[in-house]
Image (spheres, rainbow, N blue to C red):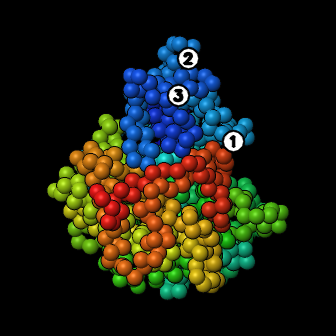
């Protein structure tokens, strides 16, 4: 059974002045740092060493440390907000209102963005209110304790925990930081309007037997027969309980009445929401597959549905990527692998299909996929950790990563070398050898640790986020979807932006707390690139053509995407076309080009 949900009064007990102030200072410091990084704000240095930002309302004074890749670390405790010459409490919502023109927020986007900021503050205050594991304890915790223990969300996005659509009780039930296991809803969907896709070595009967078991399957079949329906005419589809209650039971009412969609009941197993919120881990039987479902809430730039069109090709794409990865000697040597989405199912609601052009949110309300569990990949003595944990800082300001390094017995530099070999080297190989790119941010990778040291990584979210840049030959069938036309000058951004700016920019300052100087951090990154290229001299022409040691590279801005359109930041069918570029960033490994004077 789920834990009892608190009353409405108790559910807002965390919204107290002192916590709200801490949440506001935290988020405002992050906003100033990331908006300055994206050149939306231009802080001016004062004679006393502090910086100032002017808005149409208050002035903001603060202290900040600046590091490679134009990274701003704003001290939340240093923030001073001056309105008409008087100091007032920092207020994140007031800041967005006062700075909305500088941030490029239109009147159509501004209200939803304010909602997302309010929701992000709400969650931040809740996390400050709850007992939490210290960084030291979390560094040694199990996989699901780590998932629910993460507090920040995406490191670059400011409005990163919007979850617009969740009620007070929904937040307590389904937010990953609340750690409440819950049951999924099972639906029978008529094969005339639903399509189940599978990898070649998996049958529908095997999938359902492994996920549901014989007793549950017999019960589902009996329920259908009691309605005068044939079980042979239906597939079984898991849905998020919020999606069933808030969307499907009403918006698909005609389908339910026509018995093309039949409610079967709740799952026996209990699931825990992961950091990606619509992906669930089976806590009752961890060896079973993850389940990812459509969830029509607005969160971080997208309505989080799942496209039935994408689901049709997802297993084939995963099978192709997995075969390529697992056949490659270099990738095997790094221990790099993917978690395959082995089955996917999508329901095409006939009224929306007939009425709506394009593949918008209304067509993405009922779909799901099954992804391999990482538990089967563990060897004796190993454990799992989301890579997002490497950026985690607890409520007392202590970072998890230094604690993990201390537990390993290695120096910070030694630990970093192991990490880069497991994480960066395989990404370099995929890029240079196969023109294959992933979305390698923290939540999308699972680290396998042995002795608190990364020895292998598992990449996930393959179907929606993998791409092949300008393939030499057309890819057949569903694989055509992952062909990603990309100008040569932007191709290295899959490393320079997605890895360097998107993750290592935040990791470097945390490693400094463990005693590793910034120059040594980037020297190690450069050495990883150099070692890979020297080990594979056969692609020397590509290393010149796609130069990771270039002096600078174009600045790709994530918050600008969300500020421009917080309902669909990019078109997933052509993500390059919608990117926001502003200015350039100095490349922190340029000084370490092989052969250059150090």
Q: Nearer the viewer, residue 88 or 538?
A: 538
* Residue displayed at 61% across by 31% down: 99
Q: Residues within 10 Å of mark 2 (few under 14, many from 20)?
A: few
Residue under label 3: 53
Q: Residues within 10 Å of mark 1 (few under 14, many from 20)?
A: some
* N-terminal label among 1 and 2: 2
Residue at mark 1 to residue at mark 2: CA–CA distance: 26 Å
* N-terminal label among 1 and 3: 3
Label 1: which secondary element: loop
Quarter residue 338 falls in: bottom left
> Is residue 286 something one can see in this rendering?
yes
Quarter residue 347 falls in: bottom right
Residue 109 is marked as: 1
**Residue furthest bottom as drawn:** 201
* N-terminal label among 2 and 3: 3
* Residue displayed at 27% across by 44% down: 513
Residue 569 in the image, given as x and y percentages of width and height:
64, 53
Residue under label 2: 83
Residue at mark 1 to residue at mark 3: CA–CA distance: 23 Å
Task: Please tell me whether residue 94 is drawn above or below residue 355 in the rendered image.
Answer: above
State which mark lies toward you, 2 or 3: 3
């Amino acid at each position: 059974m789920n834990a009892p949900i608190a009353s409405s009064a108790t559910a807002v007990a965390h919204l107290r002045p002192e916590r709200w102030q801490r949440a506001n200072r935290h988020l405002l410091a992050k906003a100033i740092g990331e908006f300055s990084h994206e050149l939306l704000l231009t802080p001016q240095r004062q004679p006393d060493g502090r910086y100032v930002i002017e808005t149409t309302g208050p002035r903001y004074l603060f202290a900040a440390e600046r590091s490679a890749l134009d990274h701003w670390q704003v001290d939340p405790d240093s923030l001073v907000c001056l309105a008409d010459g008087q100091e007032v409490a920092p207020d994140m919502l007031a800041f967005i209102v006062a700075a909305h023109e500088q941030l490029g927020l239109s009147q159509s986007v501004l209200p939803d963005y304010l909602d997302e900021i309010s929701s992000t503050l709400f969650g931040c205050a809740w996390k400050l209110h709850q007992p939490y594991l210290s960084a030291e304890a979390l560094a040694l915790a199990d996989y699901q304790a780590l998932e629910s223990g993460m507090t920040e969300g995406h490191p670059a996005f400011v409005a990163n925990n919007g979850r617009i659509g969740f009620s007070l009780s929904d937040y307590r039930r389904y937010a990953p930081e609340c750690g409440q296991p819950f049951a999924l809803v099972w639906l029978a969907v008529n094969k005339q309007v639903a399509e189940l896709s599978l990898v070649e070595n998996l049958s529908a009967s095997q999938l359902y037997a492994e996920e549901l078991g014989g007793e549950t399957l017999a019960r589902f079949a009996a329920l259908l027969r009691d309605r005068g329906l044939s079980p042979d005419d239906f597939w079984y589809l898991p849905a998020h309980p919020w999606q069933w209650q808030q969307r499907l039971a009403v918006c698909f009412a005609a389908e339910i009445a026509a018995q093309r969609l039949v409610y079967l009941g709740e799952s026996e197993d209990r699931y825990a929401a992961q950091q990606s919120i619509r992906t669930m881990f089976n806590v009752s039987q961890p060896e079973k597959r993850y389940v990812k479902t459509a969830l029509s809430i607005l969160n971080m730039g997208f309505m989080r549905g799942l496209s039935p069109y994408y689901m049709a090709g997802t297993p084939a794409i995963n099978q192709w990527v997995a075969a390529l990865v697992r056949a490659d000697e270099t990738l095997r040597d790094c221990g790099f692998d993917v978690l395959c989405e082995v089955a996917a199912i999508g329901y095409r609601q006939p009224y929306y299909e007939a009425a709506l052009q394009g593949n918008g949110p209304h067509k993405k309300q009922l779909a799901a996929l099954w992804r391999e569990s990482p538990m089967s990949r563990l060897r004796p003595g190993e454990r799992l950790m989301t890579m997002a944990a490497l950026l985690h800082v607890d409520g007392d300001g202590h970072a998890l990563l230094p604690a993990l390094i201390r537990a390993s017995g290695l120096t910070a530099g030694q630990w970093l070398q192991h990490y880069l070999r497991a994480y960066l080297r395989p990404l370099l190989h995929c890029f240079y050898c196969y023109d294959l790119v992933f979305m390698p941010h923290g939540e999308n990778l699972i680290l396998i640790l042995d002795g608190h040291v990364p020895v292998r990584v598992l990449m996930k979210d393959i179907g929606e986020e993998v791409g092949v840049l300008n393939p030499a030959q057309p890819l057949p069938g569903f694989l055509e979807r992952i062909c990603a036309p990309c100008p040569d000058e932007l191709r290295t951004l899959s490393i320079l932006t997605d890895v360097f700016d998107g993750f290592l920019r935040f990791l470097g300052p945390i490693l400094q707390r463990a005693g590793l100087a910034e120059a040594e951090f980037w020297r190690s990154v450069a050495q990883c690139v150099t070692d890979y290229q020297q080990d594979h001299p056969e692609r020397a022409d590509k290393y010149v053509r796609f130069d990771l040691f270039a002096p600078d590279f174009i600045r790709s801005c994530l918050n600008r995407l969300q500020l421009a359109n917080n309902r669909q930041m990019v078109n997933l069918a052509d993500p390059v076309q919608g990117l926001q570029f502003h200015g350039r960033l100095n490349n922190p490994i340029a000084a370490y080009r092989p052969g250059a004077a150090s």
